[in-house]
Image (cartoon, rainbow, N blue to C red):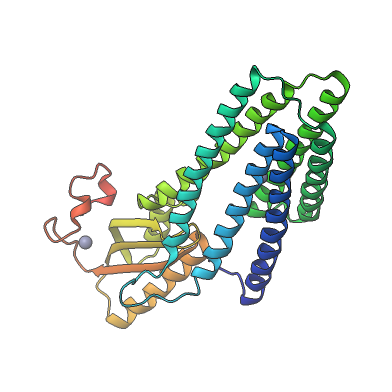
Amino acid sequence: MNPGITQDSEGSISRRLKVGIVLNLLFALTELAAGLAAESLALIGDAWHNFSDVIGLIISWVALRQVERPANERKTFGYHRASILAALANGIALIGITLWIFYAAINRLGSTVVPDAPVMMAVAGIGFLMNVGVALSLRRGTRDLNIRSAFLHLLSDGFVSLGVVAAGVIILLSGWSLIDPLLSCVIGLLVLAGCWDIVAETVNVLMEGVPRGVQVDRLLGAVRSFPEVEDVHDLHVWSLSSHVYAMSCHLQVTDLQASQGNRLLDRINQMLKERFGIAHTTFQLEAEACTLEQACVLNAKGPAAVLQPH
Ligand SMILES: [Zn+2]
Ligand SMILES: [Zn+2]
């Protein structure tokens, strides 16, 4: 969950996601059926691309809902990682489908199949209007990073659909049907690039990697900037899902009373939530730095001195 999102706007995001999922799914199914009927690999490839977009939307929607599902005695972290596992499985499945498109395109090279150009143009034309229409409706929000990337994605989807329309025109005018498998390969490469992003991001989460957009040196600097904090070590920062970040570390502090320590932790937590979106923290307060043997086994041989216990 992004910090600062109110209950209300989250409900409306969830609603918009649901509408987007249903519309995209209907269109992708139509496009797949039309692509198979018209024997157009480009249309089939574009349909799979749209399925990958639907899956992305479903994952965002599920991730939003998982946040509400409480942890229990058997899953103390709750179910945040479920969306990551689903994203990884889908990313790998889509890579397989894309390889099939390449294979079909190669087989098409020597064949005499001519795709049904009017069907290609009609269906892809609808796709173009849909994508560009939704993109333009988001245009005003393009300063927000998420909306900006959605805007760019929709625009590029629109141009892919326009490419399929153009391929239909070329087939109608010149009969050069090779353009269809060629275009399907270009679309396949775009799908692969998107899948690569999904797989890389999910693997980073599963490897407990530092969340995208969080820089450890800036994080350390921010925690050290509190006057009571003398040193920070044994730091871990990771993501439970693409939206929920967690952090743990040892804080070596001036000799504080327990109540002062409490207030310090409140201030640090507030800062971490606002500046880094970190919403789950565990701190160990130390008046003197702990010794190597007592500290975290993970950092015993780590290369970064600052992450090690001193
Ligand atoms: Zn797309
Ligand atoms: Zn320590």
Residue visible at 71% across and 41% down? 157
Left-right relation of 265 to 162: left
Left-right relation of 135 to 297: right
Residue visible at 37% across and 56% down? 237
* Outermost residue to the right: 173
Report the front residue among 248 and 125: 125
The correct choice, above or below, for 68 with respect to 175 in the image is: below
The correct choice, above or below, for 183 with respect to 133 in the image is: above
Left-right relation of 86 to 258: right
Q: Quarter of the image holding residue 169?
A: top right
The x and y percentages for residue 175 are: 82, 20
Q: Quarter of the image holding residue 178?
A: top right
Residue visible at 39% across and 61% down? 223
* Outermost residue to the bottom: 259
* Residue 207 is at least partly visible in this image: yes
The correct choice, above or below, for 141 with respect to 182 in the image is: below
* Residue 212 is at least partly visible in this image: no
The x and y percentages for residue 147 are: 68, 54
Residue visible at 43% across and 55% down? 85
The x and y percentages for residue 44 are: 67, 38
Count of numbered circles on the image: 0
Splitting the image into four quadrants, where does ligand 2 fall?
bottom left
* Outermost residue to the left: 293
